[in-house]
């Protein structure tokens, strides 16, 4: 742990309480002789640019202070830097409004993170890729480390863009979910893997590298960060009242047993639709079109408590 850790943080995203916790953690790092440098990333996609420039300058030990969006920006910056990503060690201080990715890492409460950090247990971790297609042409590309969502999932996120509160984000997400539910119309979508093709009226799609999103919803309960595969949970057309009645199952992961659910386990997926559906990755809306998802051939080393 005698490395210089480049800490990427969006100071504007921290509440007063989170800022105090961050300051306390830095004090513990000082006491332990852990060397670090603060790199503010205080704007949209600033985390991508900051991580990219740090990596190109030779940094290989990065720490993200923030939530799922901040983590995903840092990961995209690492992969955009044109370096060997498997040389990078990434630690996380989960101080965002959404800390779902860290649930899959089994992180403890934020106050206990210095102890996890000192353990230095880093594990090579998979990263997904989502490409937006116009015909056979790739018009946009994004890496993701948690979950990519499409159709209803992305429409709900679109409703919350720019409106994410620092307090009670889970409750706000559920309110927006119900609001979109009343107006959302499923589209005919084709899901194609090497093993299977499904065409149906699709309500929502979650493609998971990890298990959780939506502030604790276990959307893709079978996902494994290290198996070089993606897990897909597609929900076909379903009555709105049945969605509301089964919201609790989204948190436990038992929704995958509903008759409207199709589960796929694959290393590549194509999503095509008669009418372009929305897509998102950790709150960032994707360019509309068809989509192709895969697993990156290289990994990144991420701090885990296991």
Image: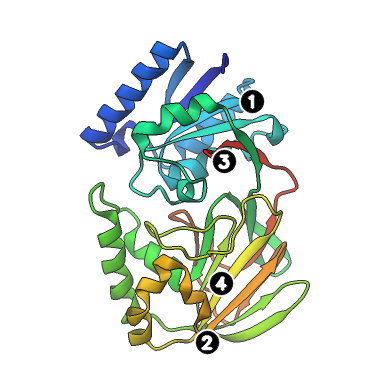
- Which label belongs to residue 56? 1
As measured in the structure, the alpha-carbon distance from the residue carrying label 4 to the one carrying label 3 is 24 Å
* Residue at the disc numbered 4: 233
Q: Looking at the image, is mark 4 or mark 1 earlier in the sequence?
A: 1
As measured in the structure, the alpha-carbon distance from the residue carrying label 3 to the one carrying label 1 is 14 Å
Closest to the observer: 108 or 184?
Answer: 108
Check disc 4 and report its element: helix, strand or loop: strand
Left or right of 269 on screen, residue 237: left
* Residue at the disc numbered 2: 259
Q: Looking at the image, is mark 4 or mark 2 earlier in the sequence?
A: 4
Q: In the rendered view, would you say 279 is above or below 298?
A: below
* Residue at the disc numbered 3: 75
Closest to the camera, between mark 1 and mark 2, is 2
Left or right of 207 on screen, residue 283: left
Judge whether residue 41 can be spotted in this image: no
Check disc 1 and report its element: helix, strand or loop: helix
Check disc 2 and report its element: helix, strand or loop: loop
Q: Residues within 10 Å of mark 4 (few under 14, many from 20)?
A: many
Q: Residue at x 47, y 46 (%)?
A: 102
């Amino acid at each position: 742990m005698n490395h210089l850790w480049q800490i990427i943080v969006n100071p504007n995203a921290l509440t007063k309480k989170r800022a105090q916790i961050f300051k306390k953690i830095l004090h513990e790092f000082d006491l332990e002789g852990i060397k670090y440098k603060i790199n503010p990333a205080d704007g949209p996609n600033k985390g991508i640019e900051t991580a990219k420039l740090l990596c190109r300058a030779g940094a290989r030990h990065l720490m993200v202070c923030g939530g799922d969006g901040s983590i995903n920006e840092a990961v995209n910056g690492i992969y955009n830097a044109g370096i060997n990503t498997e040389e990078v060690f990434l630690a996380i201080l989960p101080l965002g409004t959404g800390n779902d990715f860290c649930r899959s890492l089994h992180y403890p409460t934020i106050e206990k993170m210095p102890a996890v950090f000192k353990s230095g247990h880093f594990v090579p971790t998979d990263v997904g890729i989502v490409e937006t297609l116009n015909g056979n042409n790739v018009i946009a590309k994004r890496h993701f480390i948690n979950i990519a969502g499409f159709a209803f999932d992305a429409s709900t996120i679109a409703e919350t863009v720019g409106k994410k509160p620092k307090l009670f984000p889970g409750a706000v997400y559920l309110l927006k979910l119900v609001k979109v539910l009343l107006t959302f119309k499923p589209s005919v979508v084709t899901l194609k893997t090497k093993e299977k093709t499904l065409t149906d009226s699709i309500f929502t799609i979650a493609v998971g590298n990890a298990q959780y999103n939506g502030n604790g919803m276990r959307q893709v309960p079978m996902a494994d960060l290290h198996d070089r595969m993606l897990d897909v949970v597609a929900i076909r057309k379903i009555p709105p009242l049945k969605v509301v009645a089964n919201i609790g199952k989204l948190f436990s992961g038992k929704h995958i047993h509903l008759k409207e659910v199709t589960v796929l386990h694959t290393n590549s997926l194509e999503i095509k639709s008669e009418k372009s559906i929305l897509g998102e990755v950790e709150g960032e809306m994707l360019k509309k079109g068809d989509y192709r998802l895969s697993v990156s051939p290289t990994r990144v080393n991420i701090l885990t408590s296991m």
